[in-house]
Every structure is written in structure tokens, then in C-alpha cells.
Image (cartoon, grey):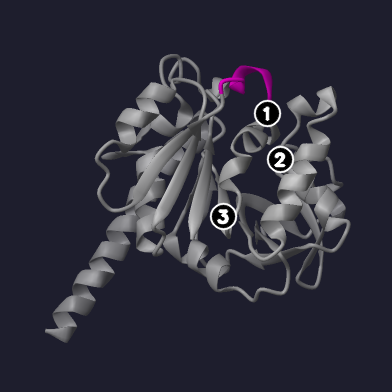
Amino acid sequence: MKVIVLSAGQGKRLLPLTEDRPKCALMLGERTVLGWQLEAFAAAGVTEVVVATGFRAGLIGQLIDGYAKLDVRTAHNPFYAHCDNLGTCWVVRHEMTDPFVIVNGDTLFEPEIFARLINSPDEHPITLVTNVKDSYDDDDMKVIVSGNELKQVDKKLPASEVHGESIGMIRFQGDGPRLFRERLESMMTVESTLGRWYLSAIDALAAQGYVGVVTTGSHDWCEIDDRKDLEHARTTVPLWFRRRLSAEERLAGAIR
């Protein structure tokens, strides 16, 4: 399974920390944000990762150089400063052929969430991962679902009507890659779409019944939008992997 990580943006809400490096290059303990993502992909059995770059692309290239656990490469969006992530998806659409997963560059997650997505039923050509919580704010990418089918995804949905939020992880299989590419091509003929999120394309495809959902279940995730999010991630993300390593070591000891 190929993973496309959308890491073209600078992360201006984190300035001055992102003055000379993109958000994905910030440190969370002993690894960068991207480094923890790659560890999660490797733990989930992913073999191929494409990092969509923009701001300080050369630095991201240095981060992945020599990473031995996965086949990792970059695909550059030279227009990153003039578009949002829908434009980045359009630039790297040549990578969207066989089944693949899109993951936001600031989404961090326990590997079990990725496994839940990959192992979920293939009833829809596109499957979006959602999380349920007690309340939602204006910054959450909220969703409305019916059963296991996505009906709408947008930040502007009324909080009183939503059933969860998107965590920024989506699987495309079967006709999914073609449907998404065609939607990108159509939307990018209109100049005003340059500032839109790629989830606006998913919202349009959901209206046609093409998008299913799977939840995070009991597993943890986080995203990094601001300083508060960053401090939370620095505390929790390394802990996920230490806990996982400890469990693996206990299992290995029991087998011996």
C-alpha cells in the first residue's frame, strides 16, 4: 500500500518555530513529526511512502535520506505558497494510480489506526477515518455520516448535527483513485479552488455515495495546528511508541 503524506505547507501558526523549517520537521522528542509518521507506517506494514513537499523541500529530503525501513521519496509542489492542499493533491496526482492512502502531514496516530483503515471492509472506493468526541469547535473538520457512509465533511457544518471529525487519513481503492483524480482535475479548472482543502473534493464524492467511514476505535491520534497541539504531541506521541515497544518486548520474552 502506498501512502502519500501532504507536507507542503510551512505551518505559519507555529511561527517562529517554522521560520526555517516546515511543520513536519519539528522535533517531538527524539524524532521529527515526519519521523514518527514513518515509524507508524513501518509498524503498520506500509512499504512505500511519497512525501508531497513545498516549503523547504530540501530539508525534508535530508530527513528521509537513508531511512531504511521504507521506500520513501518526495514529490514537490513548486506552487505550494499559492494553493492549499487540494492544489498539492493535484500536483502529485500522477502518484494516485494504484490503491493508496492520503495522510495529512500534521496527523499523528497509533499504528493500529492505520491497520483499522487498511483492514476495513471495501464497501466503498474511498474510506475516511473519523474520530468521535464530546464536542467540536470551528477548527475541526466535521463529518455527517449515515451508517458507515459519509454524507458531508466540512469545517462549517453545524456542531449540533455532526457525528465526528476527519483525522486526515483516507484510503482510495478500486475506482477510488480514478474518481479522486477526475474530481481534482474538474475542480482545478476553477481558479477559486486554489485556496480549498482536498476534503472539499471528498465532500463532493460523498454526495454521490462513494465514501465510507471507519473510526479510530479506542486508539489515540492527534494533529498539530498550534503551540498547544505541539506540546501535547511532544508528550504523548513518543509515549505511544515506548508503550508499543514495551509490549513487543514482553511478548518476545514470553515466547522465549
Q: Is residue 210 magenta?
A: no
- Identify whether 206 is placed above or below 73: below
Tags 1 and 3 touching, CB below 8 Å: no
Residues at marks 2 and 1, CA–CA distance in whole angstroms: 8 Å
Residue sitting at x 20%, y 75%? 250
Q: Amino acid at mark 1?
A: Asp
Which residue is more in the foreground, 130 or 63? 63
Q: Position of residue 76 (x, y in %)?
A: 51, 28
**Label 3: element kind:** strand
Span highlighted in magenta in the image: 78-83
Q: Is residue 76 visible?
A: yes
Q: Earlier in the sequence, mark 2 or mark 1?
A: 1
**Label 1: element kind:** loop
Q: Is residue 82 magenta?
A: yes
User: Along the horizontal axis of the image, is 235 left or right of 160?
Assistant: left
Quickly name the residue at label 2: 198
Q: Earlier in the sequence, mark 2 or mark 3?
A: 3
Which residue is more in the foreground, 179 or 32? 179
Quickly name the residue at label 1: 84
User: Along the horizontal axis of the image, is 62 left or right of 201?
Assistant: left
Q: Position of residue 248 (x, y in %)?
A: 25, 71
Mark number displayed over residue 101: 3
Q: The C terminus lies in which quarter of the figure?
A: bottom left
Q: Amino acid at mark 3?
A: Val
* Mark 2: few/some/many CA within 10 Å (<14, 14-19, 20+): many
Tags 2 and 3 touching, CB below 8 Å: no
Tags 2 and 1 touching, CB below 8 Å: yes
- Identify whether 15 is placed above or below 229: above
